[in-house]
Each structure stands twice: as structure tokens, then as C-alpha cells.
Image (cartoon, helix red, strand yellow):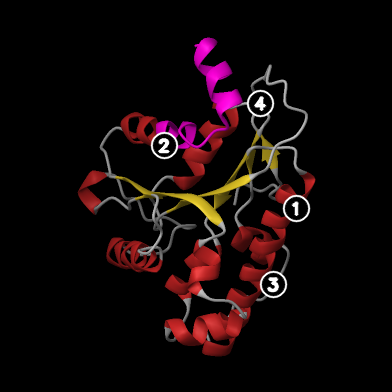
Amino acid sequence: MNGEFPTLRVGSRPCRCPEPSHEAQLVVVTGGPGAGKTAVLELAAHTFCRHVAILPEAATVVFGGGFPRHDSEAGLHASQRAIFAVQRQLEALVVEEGRVGVALCDRGTIDGRAYWPGSAESFWEAMGSTSAEELARYMAVIHLQTPPLDEGYHQDRIRSETVGRAREIDRLITSAWSDHPRRVFVPPAIEFSSKSAVALAAIRATLPGCCRALESSST
């Protein structure tokens, strides 16, 4: 967290797209701790037009709003149910408003499986949904892979996971999204500029044709 309550943002670049409304497509940006999601989404906010929304991370909304963070099994179950519900409503908001063509989700509903202390079956039963139903909600999944210790992973006060635990979470996230038909893996890179360029190119490929054409003509 950066000290400010998270909020929904849209791209800061102007757009000459003549379409009065869009049918929002949900695109997940995911990955384990230290993968660079926050930085890539910040770049996306400055790179793309107002028809691209950047949703806040549901976990940050939940815990930043005061939801108790308990390590017990009951606590983990409760927090993941809350995160799932908030994620669903954030996505519903942008889809129902119809103002953006792409909504970049800082993780998606399926990410919760990586943090759930139990089987996939118990996760979906608790959420009242199925893997197939949730996979169908997302147009694409952009997975930023957690770097090893010697390639840029940093443990600090906020990112408390060891590099081993971070990479295990990354593996679990990979498994959770394994059946999605449109996934892009962004491998670790010593230079973040290289990694972010790959990630932004993957995001650009999901833009509505009208916005993508206008963006290309202005660069």
C-alpha cells in the first residue's frame, strides 16, 4: 500500500475514439509477490487512454478498509471470501457503466485459490462458483513471473514472503489459471524496462480496435 486508499483509475492519455460507449473486457494482470504488477499497472495508467481502467487490488481494498487479517484457517477462509466478493463487484462496476473497453484487474477471482488453505473443490464451493464460470469472465491473463533472488526479488517490510514462498505462490497462481485459453507469461528480467515493455505490449493487444488504431497512429 502507498498510504492512499486504493481507487479505480482510467488511463491518462487523451483518446479520439468516436465510440460513445464500450463493452468492457476484463484482463487480469497477475503473478506472485515481487513480480512487478504494481509498477506495470502504474505504467499502464500513464500509457493508455481513458478507455482503459485500472482496478485496485481487491485484497488491498479489503485489508486497507480494516478487515481483520488472521492467519487461522477460519481467518484465511473469511478474508478470501471477502476478497472474492469485492473483486466481483469491482468488475461489475466497470462492465455495467460501459465507459471503458478494457478493465485491467490487479489479480482476478481465480487468484484466491493460491491463498486458500484447502482443495480447489472447497474453494469453489465456498465462493458459490466454478472454475469454468470464472475463467469465462476474463478475456486474457497476463502473468508476470516472480524473479529469483539473484534476478531482482527483494524482501522488505511490506513484501514479507521469502523468495521461496513467493515463487511457490507464483506456481500456485500458474496452476490456478492453467485452463485459460489466452495467457501471456512475462518472464523475469534484470532490467525492469524490458519486462514492462513485454507486459505493456500484451495489454495493448487487448485494447478495442478503435483505441488501438488511434494509439498506433499517434505514436
Reading the image, the residue beneath label 3 is 67
**Which of the marked residues, 2 or 3, is nearer the chain's N terminus?**
3
Check the image and report above or below for 37 versus 70: above
| SS under mark 1 | helix
Q: CA distance from mark 2 to mark 3?
A: 34 Å
Question: Closer to us: mark 2 or mark 3?
Answer: 2
Reading the image, the residue beneath label 1 is 93
Residue 190 percent across, percent down from the top left:
25, 37
| SS under mark 3 | loop
Q: Is residue 120 visible?
A: yes
Q: Is residue 208 magenta?
A: yes
Say if mark 2 contacts mark 3, CB within 8 Å.
Answer: no
Q: CA distance from mark 1 to mark 2?
A: 24 Å
Residue 1 percent across, percent down from the top left:
59, 52
Residue at position x 40%, y 37% in the image: 199
Say if mark 1 contacts mark 4, CB within 8 Å.
Answer: no
Disc 2 crowd rating (10 Å Cα; few below 14, some 14-19, many 20+) is some
Question: Closer to us: mark 4 or mark 2?
Answer: 2
Residue segment shown in magenta: 200-219
Q: Is residue 5 visible?
A: no
**Disc number placed over residue 202 in the picture, else none:** 2
